[in-house]
Image (spheres, rainbow, N blue to C red):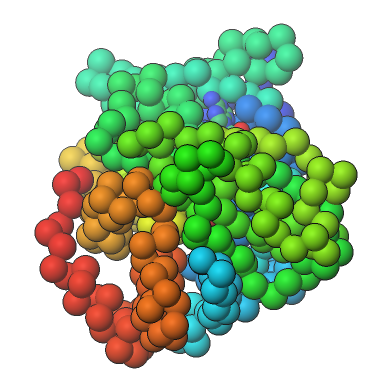
Amino acid sequence: MDGYAPPDSSSPAPEGGGDEEAQVIVVGAGPAGSATAVHLARAGLDVLLLEKSGFPREKVCGDGLTPRAVAQLVRMGVDISAAGWMRNRGIRWVCEGNQVELDWPPLGSLPDFGLTRSRHDFDQLLVAHAQAAGARLHTHVKVSAPLVDQAGCITGVTAFRGPDREPIRYRAPLVVAADGASARTAVALGLVRDASRPVAAAARRYYRSAVRTCDPYLELWADLRYPGTGQDLPGYGWVFPLGDGRVNVGLGALPQRRPVDLRAVLAHWLPRLPAEWGIKEENAASPLHSAPLPMGFNRRPQYRRGFLLVGDSGGMVSPWSGEGIAQAMEAAEVAAETIALAVARPAGPRREHALQQYPAEIHRRWGRYYRLGNLAGDLVFARHGFRPFLHPRVMASPALLRALTRLLTHVAEEPAHDRIDAVLHTLLRLVPPSRR
Ligand SMILES: Cc1cc2nc3c(=O)[nH]c(=O)nc-3n(C[C@H](O)[C@H](O)[C@H](O)COP(=O)(O)OP(=O)(O)OC[C@H]3O[C@@H](n4cnc5c(N)ncnc54)[C@H](O)[C@@H]3O)c2cc1C
């Protein structure tokens, strides 16, 4: 913004008087919002991060981070060698009595390990990182709607602050909606969900397990069934080690074709786990909580007149795996880079043209991958979960299982590192480009 003078980053939100201003407002301080704020602040922009909760706070999640997510943390300068991070070597697939461990591949462009960290700690750490980079954080501010001028361009947001829900306005010509699956800010602007794209349901519970808490693999179960009917769960189960005495145990499923009862499937599944793991009621360390997973770019457009969607608010969870943290942080980096380049231009059509590059870049990176994932979700996952892909012949073939795992987790690089990369790239090139 020409002639814009940022306020002192330590200044409190104004009491009643004039509206607080920023170059960019970010709504929501989950991984999408905090990562956007880190990158924007590092680019020298004045960014205001508005969060309805305080920190630390819980977020229902599996707490699993693949190498793509680790790469983003490293790019932001998060110290992942500090205490509290639990490293994993790869994935252990369990299906129909078989189990196979696969290490993350040794790619040049991604780390060869994953991490886990409870979202209670992870989100607090990331938001502190954003503040350290220079972002101004206001907690207990619940954004209710974007403010727009007569031409429909963004001018800020309206919100309620504090326990008394004091109405307040914040002003900025750019607003990043990173407010998660509820997508309240986008909905207020009329950006509705595309009902043809998947939304999964997932639930997790913490258990104390001295035996499994330092397991070096993320464990995925692909053969979960409903009690009584024996029908496949249209999803999968996980046991993720946290390294702090606990494991995160959960289930995710696509309810498109029939309703899913995650609690019943969990109750049916847990007795199958070896008794020495201790994953039973008396070792439960939390209630079972569930939340939706908006997938496959199910809210669009991802950019309109000063308003950008990042992370779950834009339905950016991978339709292949249900992973959303890496995707949220990667999209955040793209959004922040786009904004930084755009505000270097004078306000008007040239800046607008630069901002249009955000959805263009998101679709260049993931459009075909998500399109194919949406199709696989509809044809296979929503009927039988991962089980058909983990046929005993696939489980018995390390090459096939490696290729499948890299497809599901999007751990590949271009130019191709090996034959698996080459096959995945060829497969994706055959997919028609997705609608933006
Ligand atoms: C059970 C379950 C397990 C999962 N497991 C994994 C996993 O293991 N690995 C993985 O990568 N992904 C996982 N996911 C997906 C992952 O949790 C999300 O994709 C990720 O949190 C998206 O980040 P986000 O920042 O877009 O949204 P969120 O993390 O939802 O953050 C949104 C933030 O916005 C704030 N907010 C909301 N509304 C407002 C408002 N009106 N005003 C101000 N602030 C607001 C919220 O308080 C929150 O802090 C799982 C999801 C579920 C439900």
Where residue 10 appears, x then y in whole percent?
A: 72, 39
Q: Nearer the viewer, residue 393 or 181?
A: 393
Quadrant occupied by the C terminus:
top left
Q: Is residue 190 above or below residue 321?
A: above
Q: Is 246 situated left or right of 99 in this image?
A: right
Q: Is residue 313 above or below residue 209?
A: above
Q: Nearer the viewer, residue 276 or 409?
A: 276
Question: In the figure, residue 422 lies in which quadrant?
Answer: bottom left
Where residue 169 appears, x then y in whole percent?
A: 53, 18
The residue located at (24%, 76%) in the rendering is 425
Q: Quadrant of ligand 1?
A: top right
Where residue 259 appears, x then y in whole percent?
A: 43, 31
Where residue 78 appears, x then y in whole percent?
A: 66, 65
The residue located at (32%, 81%) in the rendering is 421
- In the picture as drawn, the residue positioned furthest to the front comes out as 228
Question: In the figure, residue 137 lies in which quadrant?
Answer: top right
The residue located at (44%, 19%) in the rendering is 145
Count of number-bearing discs: 0
Quadrant occupied by the N terminus:
top left
Q: Is 7 situated left or right of 297 in this image?
A: right
Answer whether residue 400 is visible to the viewer in this image.
yes
Answer whether residue 308 is visible to the viewer in this image.
no
Q: Nearer the viewer, residue 362 or 253?
A: 253
Q: Is residue 18 above or below residue 339?
A: above
